[in-house]
Image (spheres, rainbow, N blue to C red):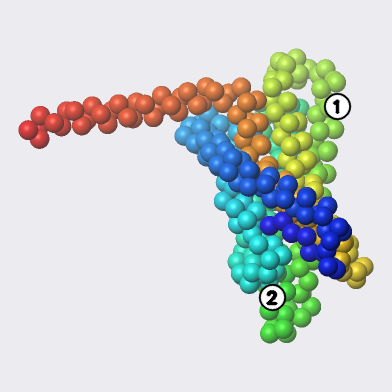
Amino acid sequence: MWSCPLNGTGGEDQLPCQHVQRALSALSLLYLLVGVPLGLGYNALLLLVNLHDPGGMTMPDVYFANMAAAGLVLGALAPAHLLGPGAAGWAVWDAGSEVHVTLLVLFNVAALVTLYSTALLALDCYIERALPRTYMSSVYNTRHVCGFVWGGALLTGFSSLLFYICGHVAARLAECSQVRHTEAADAIMLLSGYLVPVLAVLYALVLLARIRKEDTPLDRDAGQPDPSAHRLLVATVCAQFGLWTPHYLTLLGRTVLAARGRPADGHHLGALLLAKDLSRFLAFASSAVVPLLYRHMDRNFPGKLRRLMKKLQRGHQSCSLDEAGAQPVMA
């Protein structure tokens, strides 16, 4: 994955990049050995704990289950991206190859689902805080919103897919002659996948900060909000956008350079590719960080986990009793 595609013969100019390359390669391998299994395990556990008892899911649980599903996709894609040859020149990993385009579209869909679920979590937390015990923040409506999130992510990913495909077959199809720049797909992802969720989250956090300072009759009637839920919300928003912002900044840099007609070369190309790989690594790390935050900060998770374990133990004991009861008949 990590590379130093600089011009010239190398020498002392490439030494800093090579040192960074070795350090980041070791970090990526460590994440693949520890972070990916940890993220897959906790995301799967989060889904199992919440989905085995759908009636007990609250509004935030639905969004965290949504992010866990996207985290499983990211965890499955991480080895291919982090161990990819990058600038090594493999034909299967070329920017126009079908494998590269497929993995990139799946990555974009998971990114859209992750950030939109985070934004909607913040907005629904404000609705629940401002209007307690209303249908607007019910789990039923939240599940339907999650369906729209996945559908919207697939539609946006499909529009990006068209640009990638046309960039690959523009020489053979006249219809793709005007739609062949992959930077347009990056611009779509930047606008719909980052700027819109950022504005929604900032708006929700401002409203939540304002409503926490006010004392309304609804507040006194509903009681004080759970401070752990507010801490979990803030930690999730900071973690998600903190880890995904570098990735979208690199997309912004590529889009600006393409709009100005100034392709990067030499040292600028090496720095851009290094920043792209590092930002992609941070984005994958979000799939392991968020379920850990949910595991340690959600006060309802331990009880749900105990109920799941008891249910599994009862199922195992009933199977053992059935086998013991069947032995005399077999004799």
Q: Position of residue 202 (x, y in %)?
A: 83, 38
Residue designated by label 2: 168
Element marked by disc 1 = helix
Q: Are marks 1 and 2 in contact (CB under 8 Å)?
A: no
Going by the image, does 65 lie left or right of 132? left
Q: Residue at point 73% right, 31% down?
A: 235
Residue designated by label 1: 210
In the depicted structure, whether residue 123 falls above or below residue 261: above
Q: Residue at point 60% right, 29% down?
A: 295
Q: Nearer the viewer, mark 1 or mark 2?
A: 2
* Quarter of the image that includes the N terminus: bottom right
Which amino acid type corresponds to the residue marked 1 in the rendered image? Arg
Labels 1 and 2: the sequence-earlier one: 2
- The answer to whether residue 138 shows anywhere in this view is no
Going by the image, does 118 lie left or right of 77? right
* Quarter of the image that includes the C terminus: top left
Going by the image, does 232 lie left or right of 263? left
Q: Residue at point 74% right, 59% down?
A: 3
Q: Position of residue 205 (x, y in %)?
A: 81, 33
Element marked by disc 2 = helix
Label 2 Cα crowd, 10 Å radius (few <14 / some 14-19 / many 20+): many
- Measure the alpha-carbon separation of dots 1 and 2: 50 Å
Q: Residue at point 70% right, 28% down?
A: 232
Which amino acid type corresponds to the residue marked 2 in the rendered image? His
Q: Position of residue 211 (x, y in %)?
A: 82, 25
Taking the view exactly as shown, the residue that stands out farthest to the front is 11
- The answer to whether residue 57 shows anywhere in this view is yes
Q: Nearer the viewer, residue 132 or 164?
A: 164
Q: Quadrant of residue 58?
A: top right
